Structure formats: C-alpha cells, structure tokens
Amino acid sequence: MSSVASVRLALLGFGTVGRSFLRLALAQRERFRDDFGIDLSISVVASRGGVKKREAWVPEAIPFTDDLEAAAVSPDVDLVVELIGGEEPARSLLSSAIAAGKSVVTANKLLLARHGAALATAAREKGVGLGIEAAVAGGIPILRAVRESFASDRIVAVAGILNGTCNFILTEMEKAGRAYDDVLAEAQRLGFAESDPSSDVEGNDAAYKLALLARMAFGQDVPVDAIRREGITRLLPCDFVYAEELSRTPRQIARAAVLPSGNLALSVRTHLVSTESLLSKITGPYNAVQVSLERGGDFVFSGRGAGGDPTATAVLADVVDLARSGPTPLVPPLGFSAFAPLREAGPAEFVAPFYVRFVVRDRPGILAEIARAFADEAINVDAVFQAPWTGKDALPFVVTLEPVSQAQLDRALAAIARLPFHREPPLAMPMTA
C-alpha cells in the first residue's frame, strides 16, 4: 500500500471478550496494514479494578489503567472499543468519548437497547462513528444485513434463536431427557451460563437484542419493556416427550413481525417449532436469525452467537470498517436517523395454535372443567395427550388448541388456574412452523 492510516485504540474492558479482542487485533495488525492500509495500534487498555498481572502474550508497550474515563477521552486515542457491558459506566464513558470526538465500537446490547438512539444521534452530531455489529448474535453479521443488504425489499418479520445459553439448555433437555436444573448446572460448569443466569433464561438478554433488530428492521421506536417475555425455567422433561409426539421441539424464539393491521407483534418466548423448521436444527450454544421479506422470501443466518472469539471478530470488523470508510457512514448505524412511534400489536392480534400443559392431582371431571373454560372463550380443542406417567398426585397431560388469539387464551387460562386440582400453573406455548 502506498500510504498507511494510523488508528489508535482504547480498549475498555478486559474480560473474556476484551482478551479475545486484544489477541485478535494484535494477530491481525500486520495483515490489516498490508491489505487495507490501516495500522491499528492499542494505546491503552482500561479495566475496572485494573489488571493485577500482565499476561505474557500482552506486549509491554501497551499500558494498563483502571482510569476508564481518562482512557475514553485520551488525546492519544482515535477510537474507543467498549467491552465492559452493563448500562453504567458504559453509557457515560461512550458519551464522553463521543463528546471528545472519538468514534466508538460496542458489543453492549443492553446499553444499545436502552440508549442506542441517543448515542447514534450524539455520534452523528459530532461527526464520529458508532459500530454496533457485535451487539446481536455475536459473530453473525445480522445487523449489517438488516441495515443494508435488505434495503431494496420490505422486511415483514425477524425471528430467531438469540440466546445460546437457552438453546444449549433446551437442546440438552431434549437430547437426554434431563431436568432443567441439572442441565443449567452443566451449562454453568462449561461456561455457557453465568453464575446468575436470570437475564438469559428469563428472556431479557434476547429481548435487548430483539429491540435492536426490530428498530433496524421496521424503523419504529421499540422499548424493551414492550416485548412480551417468558422464560424457559418451567419446562419439564415431559414437555419434550409430548413435543416429539407432535413432531416439534421447544426453542426460545425472539420474534418481531408486522401483522395485517400494520401493528408490530413482539415477543421472546418458547415456541414448539416444527422439526422441519431450520430453527429446529440449531443446537447447543448457537444462534440463528430468520429474516422474512415481502418479495424475497426467507433468509436464515446461523453461527456462534456468543463467546470471546465470535464477538471479538464482529467488534474488530466494525473497527476496520470505521477505519476504512471514515466515521460518517452513508447508512446510520441503527438504519434510521429517527424512529417512528411504536405501533404495538395487542394480545388479540396474535393468533396461533397452542400447546397447553397441565400438571394435576388426578380426579374425575378435570378434562370437563378445562374444556368448559376453553368453550367459554370460544376456543376449539384440537387434541388431548396423556403419556403413561406414574403417580396420580402430579399427573402431566397436554391439550392442543386450534388457532386462537393470545387474548382469548389468557382469559381462559386465568379461569383454569383458579381451579383446585393444579400441582403447577398451566404452561402454554405457541406452535409455529
């Protein structure tokens, strides 16, 4: 290359992803210089609490500090990479960096879901770049595809498996017939689940990612709180037995879809997906996103959605993109310069066939009472399944329903839940293709 552009980086955060990013940036530096004419150098690594011991592979020339704010606004830095996670101090640090004229790259889905529009506006006004590709599905380049590749068509739905922890748990429960708590403990031992897994298993992590995807796909302001969330913690081994009878399998699906009314349906919940579906083939700690277009049909992106190396790869791709194209992209980082108000679909608009599992103290008349409650809401029962389980004191059985609105189902289940024979509250899952 005839000329080389120097880009000096500050790395904020030195956990799993931060370490992977630094290793990758150091390993690729010579190639980027030769192939792209970009010299990426690390000016400083900042970590809360500092770094107690410098690892042997980290060059002595790279300084470490616990002063995150000073690193974010240093005059010796052109671009700030934020890999701390969480809302604060990440939001304040990126705001300071932007105000100081630094381009920023982040993998922080929580921060972008809550403050992404404000950060994008600040970056645009300051004339600096904002890279966010790693915030959804790790190394899968789904945000760039939604923002740019499908601009010539109209997106009607985005849906997918956005949390590898949940997908690992569900596929292990399916494979071995094991209980949720047992598989969760294994996921924690293997590093697929945090010591506190609640954000993953209750659907919050996937909801942050879906909020970003939905904004970029539909140009509407999607607050995280508008997304219906249901966790995976209540699934039992029997649910996988019944699902197999129905040629289906449970998957946590994050979904945003435009309904015929023009309103946007948003949810993160466990679906029983057909075993013919591509999403049913995604196993272990992997992610997949299906984008449905008005004219172009369906596209599925899959790959490793989390972990140090996949996320670091996406972060570094944003760094290289900003270094090559300049801080002011033709397409805004969130796809739109401004968002329209959310047109939120109500529960009466979501219609699907449902699987409803009950665990009861067996006695005469249970099916009649359940059928009566469904009939009161004009809900048609499709079939009843009862595997040969032992123990009359906690008997699981399943009722499948013909297509019904979420509003009807919610009212019927509220009435059924008041009946005296339950050992557990009823569990309902939509059945989708």
Image (cartoon, rainbow, N blue to C red):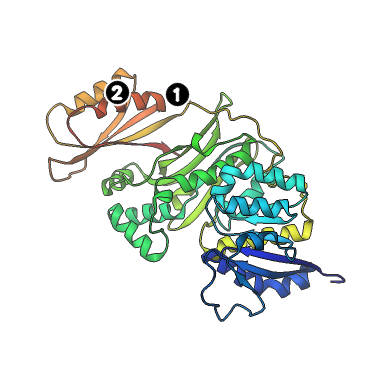
Q: How many marks?
A: 2
* Vertical side of 186 occupied by 174: above or below: above
Q: Judge the density around disc 2: few (<14), some (14-19), many (≥20) Cα neighbours within 10 Å.
A: many
In the image, residue 96 above or below residue 61: above
Q: Residue at x 31, y 45 (%)?
A: 235
Residue 380 shown left or right of residue 365 in the figure: right
- Inspect the image, locate mark 1, and give the three-letter code of the amino acid beneath it: Ala
Q: Is residue 141 visible?
A: no
> Which one is nearer the viewer's eye here, 178 or 127?
127
The residue lying at 61 percent from left, 51 percent from top is 92
Question: Considering depth in this image, is 358 or 383 the residue closer to the camera?
Answer: 358
Q: What is the C-alpha distance between the residues marked 1 and 2? A: 16 Å
Q: Earlier in the sequence, mark 1 or mark 2?
A: 1
Residue 150 in the image: state x and y as whole percent.
68, 43
Q: Which residue is mark 1?
A: 348
Residue 201, image x, y percentages: 39, 49
The residue at which mark 2 appears reads as 374
Could you tell me if residue 373 is visible in this image?
yes
Q: Amino acid at mark 2?
A: Phe
Query: On the rendered structure, is 101 left or right of 284?
Result: right
Q: Name which quarter of the figure residue 258 lies in.
A: top right
Residue at image position (36%, 46%) is: 232
Q: Residue 26 location in percent, x, y?
A: 65, 73
Residue 31: mark in rendering:
none
